[in-house]
Amino acid sequence: MNVRCHAYQLPAETYRELEPQILEQLGDADRDQLMYLLSAHDLDIPLLSGEWRVLFAATENDFYQRLDTDRRRARMAVSPEELADFVSKLREKELSKDWSPIDFSLAELADALPANCDLVGVVFVEESDNWLWCAPSYEIQAIPADVFSIIEVHINALIEQGDHASLARLCSDHCEAAVEFSVPRWDVLRQHVAERVPELVQVFAQVIAPPSDYTSICEALRLVADPLFQPSLDAWLRVHGDTDHYALYFRDIGFERSG
């Protein structure tokens, strides 16, 4: 699935006029066709990867959604008649509290939409696939424990689907710190891991390590974080190695290229 999703607000009269076409094209039309229908939108709020995923999961039984993993599509329509219920859901105190660790735009969306009325309709559409052309890099990313607890189910789903490109964007959207490696330094790191701390080989292969393993993994990484070969990793461990517990994402671009 795509990393980000946009919420487009349409005036109620415009939405009602276009609704049959919108609902038809949510499932089968390519993004450009759908965006042509939504060209009269008067609000555009982008949601980060974790945000739209938790929103869609919380509303999957209430509003019209179309998800297509193979084609990386994530779409939802909220009619003017459904708007009051949707805004009420967005503003639930318990949900707002649960989502707060990953909330960059959900609160903005909740505040922007009018409550207790049917003045607008909202259509959610995935971002364009231009992000797929960004040059990937080998990385170790640190995801805060409270954030990981929210997006873990979505991380695991992407791993199961083998969509490592989307996984990288999801983790990048919500990580707190990262170490980037050149190809030679990543190769040296993998070589030193195999020679000095072979127990980390499986950790790299599993891609994600939970916060409960953070301390032991940092201790193991210190054995291969020679400043001569891995100055960035050495510096990162000195700053973050003894701080809060994180989930760790080991981004191997070989998985993305083969996916």
Image (tube, rainbow, N blue to C red):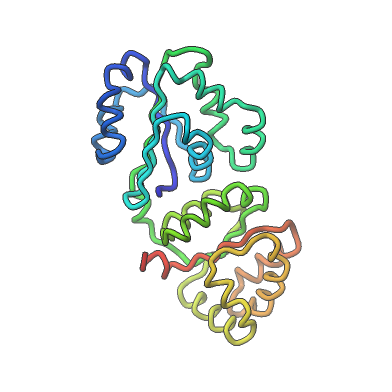
**Residue 49 x, y percent position in the rendering:** 48, 45
Q: Residue at x 53, y 34 (%)?
A: 105
Q: What residue appears at the point 47 percent right and 36 percent down from the top-left corner?
A: 60
Task: Provide residue 144's location: percent of width, then percent of height.
Answer: 65, 52
**Vertical placement of residue 203 versus 75, above or below:** below
Q: Is residue 231 left or right of residue 114?
A: right
Left/right of residue 15 with respect to residue 95 in the rendered view = left
* Closest to the observer, 117 or 133: 117
Is residue 3 shown above or below 216?
A: above
**Which residue is depicted at the point 68% across and 76% down?**
220
User: Is residue 5 or residue 90 the one in the foreground?
Assistant: 90
Q: Residue furthest right?
A: 242
| Position above or below: 42 against 206 | above
Quarter assignment of residue 103: top right
Instruction: Determine the residue located farthest toward the bottom in the rendered image.
Output: 195
Q: Quadrant of residue 93?
A: top right
Residue 107 location (% of width, % of height):
57, 30
Q: Considering the image in quadrants, where does the C terminus appear?
A: bottom left
The total number of labels drawn is: 0
From the top left corner, tell me how far across and down residue 193 is, in percent.
59, 81
